[in-house]
Every structure is written in structure tokens, then in C-alpha cells.
Image: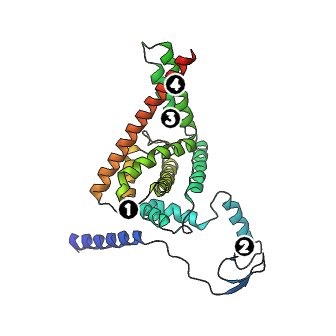
Amino acid sequence: MGIKPNIESFKAWWARMSELKKEPVAVPEPVHEHYICNHCGYSFYGRYCPQCGMPAGDVRFTFKRLIHNFLDIWGLGNRPMFRTMRDLLWRPGYMISDYLGGHHLNYFPPFKMLAVLTIFIFFVAWAFNLKDPLVGKNIADVLNGIEGIGETMKYTFNHVGRLLIFLDTYDLYRILIQNIIVVPVAWLVFRKKGYNMVETFFSQIYINCQFHLLSLLWMLITWDLPPTVFLPYYIPGSLAILVLIFDYKQLYGLSYWQSIWRTLLFILLIFIVYILLLAIATIIIAIYIGVRN
């Protein structure tokens, strides 16, 4: 058997997988059995009572239901949670597109998922005794170590450093603030692809969840933090850029080349915005300290 048949077989398999990724999750078939709701007594056909939302069928408490209720505290008792995690790693852009297109019940809510994954990140970091590099502290040390500056600027750099350390310590706040900055830039770069600002916001929250999942996998496999991180996520910066290219290609239906240059433009603009905001914050703090003194 030669190499050419193997190559053709691989191409065919890859084409099937590519098409399979584009297919949304199958919706359950309608249920035509008759039920009387155990909660409100309403007579209905289907899986859930349209009057109060109670599931149809048996309401007895079993060991399976006990486990389900315990896992549900963390969001793990819900089947869409696992499906969403799988799709964020396998078909992220298509999954987000499905969600924005109305397939809400097939996937775990983005904000709730972000909170759950953030808690898991903290737990894994604590369990493996992994230390955050505290980039904010490092930047503060650099600023405060500059020679030949006046007392006003020293106080200013000290306050800027405290702000950076705060954002570096509380990841959830940092992610939410970051999205306030990232969403307008993402919408500007990809605005011709049909999503409005709010839809772009939801898509970015899901991408945050994806990066959290990759961070968890990295930490669980290596038992360490990567040497260079794509803040506020614990994955290498080069990997994060490749993932973003992959995400935006699927989400916006781009070619590889379009996805690459738009993603790089997106990252460049984000960097410029961060520098401008840091400069504005420094100027405002310096003015405040000058007026106060």
C-alpha cells in the first residue's frame, strides 16, 4: 500500500471532520406522552410542565439524583456543561455561532460557566501550590525603581502599581474589565461579519471560558504555570494567538489568511489601548496627587 492512498484517506477523513464541526448539536425529538404535573397538577404533553417548568416523569429521590444535585452546585450536574466544554475545545467558533443563533439550551450559560471555571482555576492552583507570577507587582517594581524622578512621580507609580497588583490578584474582575476593553476592539476588527456589540461580548466571554479550560489542562498536565502567559490566563502566549486564529476563523467564517491578519491586528490594537489607558491612569493619578499636595 503506497503513501498516496493514505494521504487521500486522511484528506477524506479531515473533510468529514470539518463538516461535522459545522453541524449544531441535535435537538431532542418532541415527546408526545401525556403527563400530569406533580407540582401544580397541570395536564400537558412534553418533557416539562409549561405552567411551572417542573420536569415530567418520576420525582422520587434516588442515589443518582443525590449525586446530580451535589454536582449541580458546581454546574457539573448539567449535561450542557460537559457538551460546552467539549465544543469549546473542538469546535469553539461554530459553537459560539450556534449559541448566538438561538441554540441556548444546548450550551451552558457563558457567565455562569466563566465563574465556575474561575473557581476551578483557583482550586487547582491552590492544590498544586502554583504561584501567580504577579506581573502587576513586577511592573510596579520597575516603575518604582526608575532613578531621577521626583516624589510626586514616585507616589504616582506606587498607586499605579497598587492598581495593577489588584487587577492581577482578582482574576474575575480583571477578566470582566478586560472584556470591556476587548469587546469594542473585536467588534471594530470583525464588524463586517454581522454580529453586534452585545453578541461580540457574549462571544468573548465564551472565548474566556475556552482559555480557562486550556489553562486548567496545562496546569493538570504540567503541574506548573507556563513560562510566558497570555494574561489573565495561564497558557503560553504563542498558543493563545493560535487558538484565537482558530476561534475567529470558525466564528466569522474567515479564510486562514483573513483570520491570521485580523487576529494580529486585534492583538496589536488591544496592546495600544492598554498602553493608552495606563498612560491616562498615570496622568490622572499624578494630577490628583499634585493637587492634593
State how far apart marks 3 and 2 are (Cα).
49 Å
Q: Is residue 286 above or below residue 99?
A: above
Measured as percent of width and height from the top left, residue 161 is found at: 52, 27
For this rendering, which residue is in front, 243 or 45?
45
Labels 4 and 2 touching (C-beta < 8 A) = no
Of label 1 and label 4, which has the lower sequence position?
A: 1
Tell me if 105 is positioned left or right of 18 in this view.
right
Of label 3 and label 4, which has the lower sequence position?
A: 3
Q: Amino acid at mark 4?
A: Ile
Q: Please identify the quarter of the rendering in which residue 105 is found.
A: bottom right
Q: Amino acid at mark 1?
A: Gln
State how far apart marks 4 and 2 are (Cα).
54 Å
Q: Residues within 10 Å of mark 2 (few under 14, many from 20)?
A: few
Name the residue: 29% across, 60% down: 255
Name the mark on residue 52: 2
Residue ID for mark 1: 250
Q: Is residue 156 above or below residue 32?
A: above
Q: Secondary structure at mark 4?
A: helix
Q: Secondary structure at mark 1?
A: helix
Residue ID for mark 4: 285
State how far apart marks 1 and 4 are (Cα).
42 Å
For this rendering, which residue is in front, 151 or 31?
151
State how far apart marks 3 and 4 are (Cα).
26 Å
Say if residue 233 shows up in the picture.
no
- Labels 1, 4: front one: 4
Of label 1 and label 2, which has the lower sequence position?
A: 2
Residue ID for mark 3: 133
Q: Amino acid at mark 2?
A: Cys
